Image: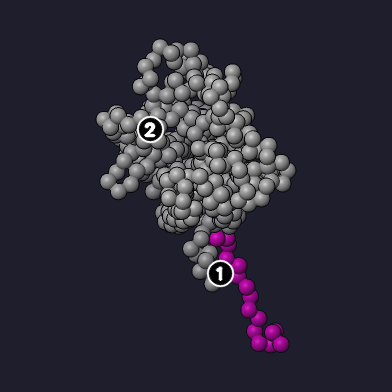
Amino acid sequence: MERKLTKIFKGDLTLWVILILLSLISLVIVYSATGKLAYREAGGDTLHYLIRQVGFILGGIAIMLLLINIPVVVYFKLSPVFVGITILALIVAIIQYKLTGNADKETSRSLNMPFFSFQPAEMAKIVLVMYASRLLSKAQRTEEELKNAFFWITGVSGAVCFLIFMSNFSTAALIFFTIMILMLIARVSFKYILSLVGIGALMVVLIYFTADFFPESVGRVHTVKGRIDDFLKGDNDETKGTTQADYARLAIFEGGMFGKGPGNSEVSNYMEAGYNDFIYAIFVEEYGFIGGAGLALLYLILLFRGVIIVRRCDRTFPAFMVTGLVLLMIFQAFINMAVSVGAVPVTGQPLPWVSMGGSSMLFTAASFGIILAVSANNQKNKIAAEPLVVVDIPNEDQAL
């Protein structure tokens, strides 16, 4: 039985344990945080969103089990094709949004297909890491190769992130920052990275000071300026009542050291995004500082296991790919937590594998699946590399 399980659930065992623990946390906190939503959208059926979350988790695990069995070389060869598909999906999503004229923020981020919809920005996270890893792995011999890789990666990532920026600034910034860190790890000259950081900071400053000159329909410039102002000067909506960020801080304060206990959150009844962007605050309210620290520790262990998987890689491409995917999830997790405690301006980043399911959860599953595939490949290579041990079998006389 144990051998059958190890054949199915391949890869790093500790990573699977983290996934199981995050899945359990997700189920209990999503069930607790969706009470208000259930009465508003599901006719009072409080089990509706719990069952939905179970479906997303099982679907995500199925994606992981599928991707574990795909050779790593496939990602290397197909990454340019994936980039083209991602750019096309982002453009179609923008055109679709403009044609429908729907003012809903989530709709502006989604590509609606006949039977499902998804956010191309979530696909872009994985695809750009693959593409950057491919170029960086091929450019490790000379400085000139790294320089060329830097310009190609910056150009492609900049184009994709610009398309994402039209509807989601925080995701565009998260992806571009992760790609920069990945290039730094891959030994791209620090002066190139520093110049890129300077250009990025200059763009944010320009967006902030010129936002009022742009019409409301242009990207997210007004949202960026508004959230920076809210963080630095206080939220203008506070004059109308308590804001979502205020509720998040209240939830954390109410949680104290040990929390109110499972299902006892009161703040979730007043929050619009307590099951998604501010789910960490609701978790701390119910499980306290101890529970919140434990959840943060799981992501730190994920980072540690990612480092171990990378160190065991015998090729640069899978090492870079795992590095980028792990960094994406860790950065996203701690941005979500930082928003909940009021340390950074409000953004729309869900807590990986914990927030209520959607396309973000399925693409997070894809990231985990690729990381596990690399881990399983490392284990296979280790077994293949072990020398055969020749044992002298004594004859009958010697045995006796």
Q: CA distance from mark 2 to mark 1?
A: 49 Å
x and y percentages locating residue 382 in the rendered image = 56, 57
Total marks in image: 2
28, above or below 241, in the image: below
> How many residues crowd around disc 1 within 10 Å: few (fewer than 14), some, or many (20 or more)?
few
Q: Quadrant of residue 296?
A: top right
x and y percentages locating residue 131 in the rendered image = 41, 37
* Residue 385 lies in the magenta stretch: yes
Q: Nearer the viewer, mark 2 or mark 1?
A: 2
Residue at 54% x, 46% y: name it: 33
Q: Quadrant of the N terminus?
A: bottom right
Q: Quadrant of residue 103?
A: top left
* Nearer to the camera, 25 or 191: 25
Q: Main secondary structure of the magenta part?
A: loop
x and y percentages locating residue 175 in the rendered image = 48, 33
Q: Specify how the rendered protein is coloured.
A: one colour
* Nearer to the camera, 395 or 284: 284
Which residue is labeled 1 in the image? Answer: 2
Q: Left or right: 356 with respect to 262? A: left
Tell me, yes or no, whether the two marked residues, 2 and 1, touch with CB atoms within 8 Å. Answer: no
Mark 1 residue type:
Glu
x and y percentages locating residue 143 in the rendered image = 50, 27
295, above or below 340, in the image: below
Which residue is labeled 2 in the image? Answer: 104
Write down the region rendered in magenta.
383-400
* Nearer to the camera, 47 or 324: 47
Q: Secondary structure at mark 2?
A: loop
